[in-house]
Amino acid sequence: MTPSSIRNLSLAFVTFVASLFLTGCATAPGTTFTELKTAAADQANVYIYRRDRIFAIGMSFTVGVDTKPVGELYNASFINLSLTPGKHTITVKPGGMAKNFALDIQALPGKTQFVEFDLNGGPLANIFFVGSELIQRPQDKALADLKTLKSAQ
């Protein structure tokens, strides 16, 4: 390779990386999490959240419950849903050719539950989000994560 082609290749790479950071940075419109909302006796609260990751920082993902869209999940954000008790399927759809993620939960009356979209953002990060998953989290872990997140609603 000639010095000129190395310089051109380096410039193309820097331009590509810069465009990833500057393209449509989707950010959560709400306020930072402060406290849990109490679930009504005949309803279940479900928090769905996504921790801060550099990978896919500018992307929002469509969240659904039982095949119905309920909102967008941004980088470092959460959605709080009030659901009827019973079985529900939570979905997160990254879009494009990426796989959709689903998790069945049993929503309990008067209880609060937590589901994290654990985005694979490490060295194995990829455009198909292989290695990412929806995981039900215990309250102590979820509260520690939620402290730095903003409401997506």
Image: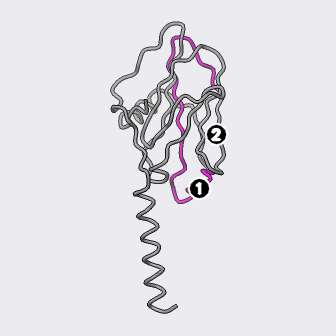
Q: Quadrant of residue 23?
A: bottom left
Query: What secondary structure predominates along the stretch shown in magenta?
Result: loop
Position of the C terminus, as image quadrant, is: top left
- Give the residue type at disc 1: Ile
Which residue in the structure is indicated by mark 2?
Answer: 101
Position of 134 relative to 8 (above/below) = above
> How far across and how far down the image is residue 118, in percent?
54, 42
Q: Which mark is residue 127?
A: 1
- Tell me, yes or no, whether the two marked residues, 2 and 1, touch with CB atoms within 8 Å: no
Q: Secondary structure at mark 1?
A: loop
Sooner in the amino-acid sequence: mark 2 or mark 1: 2
Position of 123 relative to 13 (above/below) = above
> How far across and how far down the image is residue 50, in percent?
48, 39
Q: Which mark is residue 73?
A: none
- Please rate how many residues cluster around mark 2, counting C-alpha atoms within 10 Å: few if below 14, some from 14 to 19, many from 20: some
Residue at left 55%, top 50%? Answer: 120
- Out of 86 and 61, give the one closest to the viewer: 61
- Residue 106 in the magenta stretch? The answer is yes
Would residue 43 be found to the left or right of residue 145 on screen? Answer: right
> How far across and how far down the image is residue 136, in percent?
57, 31
| Residue stretch rendered in magenta on the structure | 105-130
Q: Quadrant of residue 101?
A: top right
